[in-house]
């Protein structure tokens, strides 16, 4: 129950605060910062329990209705291997409050161990519109052929570009590419594949946020993400150019520990394992209100998108 979860989380928070006090008393700055971060994460989990209902209506009809969704947050630990040695761990918080479908698909892939054994690759990309695009090189994780094929349908599963946008005088709105479909829309979200940027709003999450991770998708195929994700290191691109990614890629989480490991990744490093925390798994919802027909329709549309993109 929620009360039982709260009791466990409060006890975890108490333990983290005690460890923080101990680290502070012995002037261990590194440990104190780690424990401070752990305490804040524990406090965030408690705060989730105060949310009476999920603040956004996630689409329950249409092409993408069958996709998993994360109605809260979840913590994932990626263990990275280089050669025969363990390089270290990277901890990511998947945030369903900023991208419920994207975060849900990410956690679903982690639970399926899809990422286990996959190598890191670096990818040269062009960011921004043609008139002002800039090149950048990013570390991409989760690359395997076209992406993830759903065993339920044996077809490629793709993820819509999902972004919470801010408009002056209005509450934040959950939108999808390419026409800014909101949570109340029942229109087929795969009808238009090219991204049409907003000019009257801005994303809630922007890529000047340290440690942000987002799904990768083919150029000009905003709804073509499947499994690959990336983050920006200091060498990826100039800080004053990162705004070009805002609204074109869907952030779904943050690196909260192991950022130094992430920045040191090299092509060929391998994801040894992924571990999702138990409380986070309780926020994962799969195949809600979707018929088998809707699932097949959605994956067929995704496969057509991939086939057409390979011809461009």
Image (cartoon, helix red, strand yellow):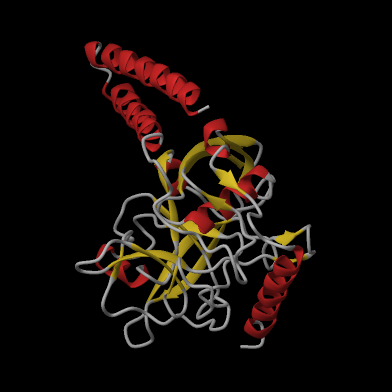
Query: The C terminus lies in which quarter of the figure?
Result: bottom right
**As drawn, 79 above or below 105:** above
Q: Looking at this view, is 23 or 182 the one in front? A: 182
The residue under the point 37% across, 77% down is 128
Please, is residue 86 above or below residue 291 in the view?
above
Residue 252 lies, in percent from the top left, at 45, 54
Q: How many labels were placed on the picture?
A: 0
Residue 23, by quadrant, is top left
Image spot of residue 210 (x, y percent): 32, 50
Q: Nearer the viewer, residue 288 or 128?
A: 288
Where residue 201 appears, as percent x and y from the top left, is 27, 72
Q: Locate residue 189, reporting x and y percent.
A: 55, 75
Question: 112 or 8: nearer the eye?
Answer: 8
Can residue 108 be seen at all in this image of the molecule? Answer: yes
At x 69%, y 60%, the residue is: 148
Question: What residue appears at the point 50 percent right and 49 percent down from the top-left corner?
Answer: 265
User: Is residue 40 placed above or below 154 in the rendered structure?
Assistant: above
**Along the line of sight, the residue nearer the viewer: 74 or 188:** 188
**Taking the image as drawn, is residue 78 in sight?**
no
Q: Look at the picture and state if 163 lies above or below 110.
A: below
Q: Who's the residue at 53% across and 37% down the image?
A: 280
């Amino acid at each position: 129950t929620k009360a039982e979860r709260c009791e466990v989380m409060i006890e975890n928070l108490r333990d983290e605060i005690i460890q923080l006090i101990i680290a502070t008393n012995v002037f261990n700055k590194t440990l104190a910062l780690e424990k401070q971060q752990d305490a804040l994460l524990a406090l965030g989990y408690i705060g989730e329990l105060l949310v009476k209902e999920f603040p956004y209506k996630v689409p329950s009809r249409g092409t993408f209705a069958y996709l998993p969704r994360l109605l809260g947050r979840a913590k994932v630990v990626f263990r990275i291997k280089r050669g025969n040695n363990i390089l270290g761990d990277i901890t990511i918080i998947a945030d369903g409050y900023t991208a419920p479908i994207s975060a849900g698909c990410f956690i679903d892939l982690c639970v399926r161990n899809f990422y286990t054994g996959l190598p890191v690759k670096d990818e040269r990309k062009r960011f921004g519109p043609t008139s002002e695009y800039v090149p950048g090189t990013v570390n991409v994780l989760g690359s395997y052929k076209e992406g993830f094929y759903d065993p339920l349908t044996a077809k490629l599963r793709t993820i819509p570009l999902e972004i919470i946008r801010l408009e002056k005088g209005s509450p934040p709105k959950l939108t999808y590419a390419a026409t800014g479909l909101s949570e109340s829309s029942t229109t087929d979200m795969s009808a238009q594949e090219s991204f049409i940027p907003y000019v009257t709003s801005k994303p809630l999450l922007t890529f000047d946020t340290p440690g942000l991770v987002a799904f990768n998708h083919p150029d000009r195929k905003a709804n073509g993400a499947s499994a690959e994700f990336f983050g920006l290191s200091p060498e990826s691109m100039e800080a004053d150019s990162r705004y070009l990614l805002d609204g074109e890629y869907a952030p779904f989480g943050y690196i909260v520990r192991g950022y130094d490991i992430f920045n040191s990744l090299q092509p060929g490093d391998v994801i040894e394992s992924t571990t999702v925390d138990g409380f986070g798994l309780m926020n994962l919802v799969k195949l809600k209100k979707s018929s088998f027909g809707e699932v097949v329709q959605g994956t067929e549309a995704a496969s057509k998108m991939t086939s057409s993109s390979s011809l461009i």
